[in-house]
Every structure is written in C-alpha cells, then in structure tokens.
Image (cartoon, rainbow, N blue to C red):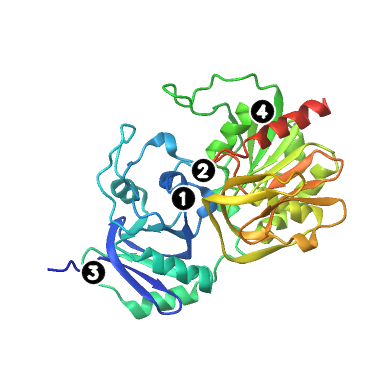
Amino acid sequence: MEQKPTACLALADGTIFYGHGFGATGEVVAELVFNTAMTGYQEIMTDPSYAAQVVTFTFPHIGNTGITPEDDEAPEPVAAGIVVKWDPTEPSNWRATSDLADWMARRGRIGIGGVDTRRLTRAIRQQGAPHVVLAHDPQGNFDIESLIAKARAWPGLVGLDLAREVTCAQSYRWDEGLWRWNEGFGGDGPDRPFRVVALDYGAKRNILRSLAESGADVTVLPATATAEEILAHDPEGVFLSNGPGDPAATGEYAVPTIRRLLDRDLPIFGICLGHQMLALALGAETIKMNHGHHGANHPVKDVETGKVEITSMNHGFAVDAQTLPQGVIETHVSLFDGSNCGLRVADRPVFSVQYHPEASPGPQDSAYLFQRFADAMQTRR
C-alpha cells in the first residue's frame, strides 16, 4: 500500500510536490534554493546566510552521517527547511551524536523527503528561486489553495534586512582555532598578534576560526556597530562577515560605518555579504540573481593571475561589476556565469571575495586569503 504524503512543498506558481515529512511539524514560507554540495548538510543548515530559505539538496543521500555539535556553524539551524530525494537514514559515522530528523524536530526545522529533486532543481534554474510554503502534517491534511496563496503573498528577500536577525546580541572575543585530528577545536594554536574586529552580519564559526588561525585576536561586534564602537577597540584590521538578505537593505546602516573605516586606511577583508557591503560602500551596486550560487564546487578565476580556484558559495545577490568605480579592481569572476566574485582597492589593503574561503563545507583552495589579510596587517605595522 502506498504511503500517504505527510509533507508538501507549494510553489507560488501553483506547482505542488508531495513527500514524506520529517523533523518539526507545521509550515514555513521562504525562498527555495538548491545546493549541489555532496557533504556538509549540517554546516549548510546552520549557515546564517540561509535565513528565510528552504534548501533543496541535489545530492540524494542527506543525513547518513548524522549530526555532531562540532559541525555547527551557528548555535542553531538557520535555514527554514530542507528538501531531499531520499528519506534520511540512520546515521553511520563515529562522530554522530544524533540523527538528522530528531535534530531538526528539536530545533523546529521542517524536512521533506521523497521529492524529485532533479525536476525541482531544473525548475529553480529555469524560473528563478521561487517563493514556497513547506508544510509537514503527520495526518497528511493540507489546504493547498491556502498554501499557494501564502507563497504568493510572501514579499521575498528583496529589500529584506536579515542581518539584524542573525547577528550577535553583544560583542564577544573569539579564540578558537581550526579543527585538528583527535584534538577538536582547541584554543591552542599559533600566536595571535593582530587585533581584528569582525562585524557579524551572520558570521560562520569556521570563518572566525580561520581568522584566529592566521594570527588574528578577534573581537566580534554586532552588525549595527558604529564606527566609533569599532575604532574603540583600536583594530589593526576589520573583517566583514557573510550573512543573509538583501545587501542594499543591510547597507542602510552598514555602508556609512564602512565608509568611516575606509577613511582610516585600515586593512579590510570581506566575505560574501561582507564583500557586497564593501562594494556598496565603495560606490558599486548589487543585483538579485536568478537562482544564486549555492554549492561547494564553483570554479572562480583570479583575473589578475589566471589561476582557477574551486570554491564554496552561498549567495542570491551579486555585485554588479559594471558599477565598480575607478580605482576598484575586479579580481575574481565566476566561470559559471561571469558574475563578480572579488574586488580590491588599488594601492590599499582593502579586498573582498564573494565565495567562502573558510570552506565549511568545501574545498580549501582559497584559504590563503586569510593569510593575505594577516600580511596586510603586518605590512601596516
């Protein structure tokens, strides 16, 4: 006897996908994106850049390594829900402390399995990231017309400042380095001589670990911190973190602060939303992408050296390279679609990238950028 659907995914265009629900019950409205990574589903779920998004995993086997607290990129999962091909199985990994479904249920996140994720991914690529409602009811009772209406009524991410929702409530020090075999995330590591203020627009933990590993004594401040509050820490460098939402909306308060910092000629390094914030502060513009970049296999070309790096990405907005002002140089481009993936200011220690060099999950081709930031601070000394 065929199992009755206990979850459904309702797209704003009226398309319905049925499947098997797991995790929390209820419903959530969000933007739907797909991620092509073959590993790291826990890191993806806890990446604050996925706020207000449901993630479709193109890799079918999600949940098979379970959950371990060491892999969290934030204290709680931030992605609104997930869509998978196969229902999560019992975990088979020595590090696992719980399974994916139970973890999601405890954390209030909805999942749906048994979905044709290839068809869904094609729809996202062709039509753009849709607004959806993901619903899970163990009894299988769904008011489809109501779900579609809610998806259509949701305003979407354009104009939405989500950094305020995921940023830290107050400042704190970060002293944890990178993970080491049989040691975990220890505080012991290289000397950390450089005073760095990290602005938290939704920072992943592995970014902060990578900063610490490169010699940064990191103080994390909320996204809304003023230039005066930042400079009160006498930083030798400022880091602009990743994060969710529309960069133009976050830029309403972040851009004036960054411009004040640019006047001080400090080394500045940005990643993802931080890259977009820096670009806006320098006078460029950002645009909403059709379906964004979400995965751990994105080729990026360094246009100044010709080197190609395989990178991890997660963004639905991009810097419009045509709007970069004079003196701001495009350093990296996506080999998938030619979109901007990096910039630097001529003759100044200010640079940023759209992708994630901390690689959690993903390749580590770009980890050298953290050392470049440290070198800039050393040169300034």
Under mark 1, the amino acid is: Ala
Q: Nearer the viewer, mark 3 or mark 1?
A: 1
The residue where tag 3 is placed is 140
Under circle 1, the secondary element is: loop
Neighbour tally class for label 2: few under 14, some 14-19, many 20 plus, Cα within 10 Å: many
Q: Nearer the viewer, mark 2 or mark 3?
A: 2
Q: Residue at x 39, y 54 (%)?
A: 59
Ranked by sequence position, the earlier of labels 4 and 1 is 1
The residue where tag 4 is placed is 216
Q: Residue at x 34, y 57 (%)?
A: 111
The residue where tag 2 is placed is 362
Asked whether residue 147 appears in the rendered view, the answer is: yes
- Furthest-front residue in view? 306
Q: CA distance from mark 1 to mark 2?
A: 8 Å
Under mark 3, the amino acid is: Gly
Neighbour tally class for label 1: few under 14, some 14-19, many 20 plus, Cα within 10 Å: many
Q: Is residue 78 left or right of residue 259?
A: left
Q: CA distance from mark 4 to mark 1?
A: 29 Å
